Each structure stands twice: as C-alpha cells, then as structure tokens.
Image (cartoon, rainbow, N blue to C red):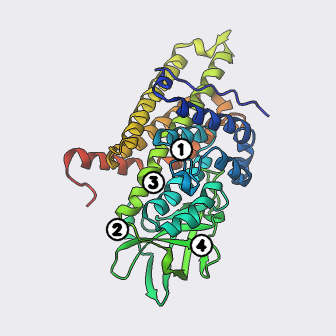
Amino acid sequence: MKPDLFQAPDYYQIDDLLSDEHKMVRDAARSWVKREVSPIIEEYAQRAEFPKQIIKGLADIGAFGPYIPQEYGGAGLDQISYGLIMQEIERGDSGVRSTASVQSSLVMYPIFKYGTEAQRKKYLPKLASGEFMGCFGLTEPDHGSNPGGMTTNFKEEGEYYVLNGAKLWISNAPFADLAVVWAKDASGRIHGLIVERGMEGFTTPETHNKWSLRASATGELIFDNVKVPKENLLPGKSGLGAPLGCLDSARFGIAWGAIGAAMDCYDTALRYAKERIQFDKPIGGTQLQQKKLAEMITEITKAQLLAWRLGVLRDQGKATSAQISMAKRNNVDMAIKIAREARQILGGMGITGEYSIMRHMMNLESVITYEGTHDIHLLITGMDITGLSAFS
C-alpha cells in the first residue's frame, strides 16, 4: 500500500486569506482523508463499491451539514469551511465527496431551509451523525437539464399524499434511509416531500456498470402509489426555485471539491516528473513537461481564488446563482483538463490504479455533467450577462 504523500499547492499564499478555524477544519479533513480514504479507495473503485465504513468518519470531521446550526446537530461553520471540507474529500475521491455534498446540500439543507421545526428536529441530528443517510430526487429518465418538465406527481388521499413516478442517477439511493423528492401536485406546482425507506411502493434499484464514480452508490427512486404522510411535505418553499436553491449549495461545494481533485493530479504528476528518469535526466527538466506543470498550477491558483471569493460572497449572503454556476463550470473544466495532462506526464503508469489520476479523470467526467452540465452553466452565464434566455 503506497503512502499518501500529498502536499497541497498554494502558489499565491491563499492560506493567508483563511482564518485559523478554516485551516484547522481543512487540516482535520486532510488528515482523515490521508488516513481513512487514500489507503482503500482504489480497491473500492475497482470493485465498484462504496466504503460504508467511512460514514462515521465523514460525520466526525463535520462533512454532513457543516453549516447547519449546532442545535440541529451541524457544526455551525461558515461557507468557506464547507468548501474546504469538500476540497479535501474530493482530493481523496469525487464519489466520496458526492456522498457528503448530497447529504449536506441536497438533503439537510432543504429540510433546514424549507422544513418545519418538527422535521428539523426529527431528521437533521441523525443526518448530521450519519445515523441516517439521505438522497435527493430531482432528475428523471426524460428530464435532466429541464427538471421543470418532471412527471413525478402526488395527489391528496385522506391523511396522505400518494406519490408516483421515478428518479434516475441518484447518488446514495441504494442505501439511503430517506429521500427528499421533488414532485408536482395536482395543479402542476413542484413541492418537496420526505420519503422514508420502508414506505410501501418505494424502491431504490442500484445502477451498475459505471465507468465513473465507481466508489459512489448510484441508483433510481421508484414510487408506485407510495403513501407519504402529509406532515412530510416541506412547506417553506415550492416551485422549481426550491430544488434549484439546494443545487446552488451543492454546486458551491463542487466548485471547491474539483480543486481537490486537480491538486491531487498535479501533486502526483509533479512528484513523478521529478523522479522519472529518461534520457539521463528527470522528465521534469524538459520544456514540454514544465509547460504542462506550469499551466496546471496557474489554473489551480485561479480556481482557488475564484472559489475563495465566492465563499466570501456566500458568507455575506451576496453570491448569485449565476456566480455559483460560473465557479462550478470553470473549476470542474479546469480539473478534468489537469487530470488529462497529468495522465500524459505519467505515460502508461497513469492508467494504473497505482496512481489516482485515471480514477480522478473518470470521476470528473460525471462531475462535469451532474448538477448542471458544462453547457447549461455556460448558458446560465450567458443569460445573466445578456438578459436573454437561450433555454427556450
């Protein structure tokens, strides 16, 4: 088993912009990833299995709802702390970060933001501790980039809502204890419902044969006349803006997380370039490899500054959805390009599980698509700067 020798790049001394608490939170997450994730993740990715034994550790480092108030089991941290935790976890693996960010931003966030006090007290502490794991049901087989076209629906029937429909590409679905599901009422208005495992007619078949996010559990949510108690409706917000508000939080975490994957690929490639001898000298001493490495650290530095500034704006309540879209698109695109360049520096060794690069590259092919594709986020920016929508 190879030791985790990762050293984080900080070319512009961005640590000087962080508080002592930020660095403490980040360093705790980094140490945990080195100790608990790095030694096992290649094996689990090869087996296409999520390592469930790390759930408690994720909870212990505050990865589940770090910005949720302490009275509901969260750590009460700020948005930059949340971003730094996601950065460190994705440095280990994008699939593990997906598990954490789904739990935080797509399950705990809507319950906290849109739920009743009874719902907060019932679910949030158990989600924060990892006793309950959740998932988020928005995407459907025929409605991905256009979630407003969803067909999943519910109707009133006595003390229950009867839910029918299906969701696809749902992280955590195979083992989730509950799902925050978005569905249309009889008038076509979108609402959030908390659906618990064990409710009759609710099943979560697992998605197999993935080449990406192999260490993350992905599945479907099937609702066949599921009776959901009326008290499980999230009353605080309805309409498409409700799930999109959750996605803002998740995309913010992705913007930070992608930096972690990029840093890991860069650090691996840099170390390899200084050690690999060809033509009687390290390949890092050649112009072409230095060009690759110099461009990598430049792009990582730009992404770090973009994410940090977005974190400041989020903490001030000033960040817009369009600004979050820009950071998600830019940083994931940056990371996947760095993964590809890093793989070339390692040559044939870059495709093996001895190094993390190929796993990161495959994972990022999903990250660049989920929670808003690269092209959709470009159009969000385009609409924001022109005032004209290209979506219809």
The residue indicated by pointer 2 is 239
Q: Amino acid at mark 3?
A: Glu
At 39% across and 34% down in the image, what residue appears? Answer: 309
- Do the residues bearing badges 4 and 3 touch, measured as CB atoms within 8 Å? no
In three-dimensional space, the C-alpha distance between marks 4 and 2, rounded to whole angstroms, equals 22 Å
Q: Is residue 385 left or right of residue 369?
A: left
Q: CA distance from mark 2 to mark 1?
A: 30 Å
Instruction: Report the residue at 43% width, 34% height from top.
Output: 308
Q: For mark 3, what is the residue? A: 371
Q: Earlier in the sequence, mark 4 or mark 1?
A: 4
Measuring from the top left, give residue 125's x and y in whole percent.
60, 59
The amino acid at mark 4 is Glu
State the SS at label 3.
loop
Which is nearer the N-term, disc 2 or disc 1? 2
Instruction: Say above or below: 34 vs 114.
Output: above
User: Horizontal and vertical percent for residue 214?
Assistant: 64, 51
Residue found 39% across the figure and 64% down from its top:
147
Q: Nearer the viewer, residue 137 or 378?
A: 137
Which residue in the protein does label 4 denote? 196
What is the three-letter code of the residue carrying label 1?
Answer: Leu
Instruction: Looking at the image, tell me whether mark 4 or mark 3 is earlier in sequence order.
Output: 4
Q: CA distance from mark 3 to mark 1?
A: 12 Å
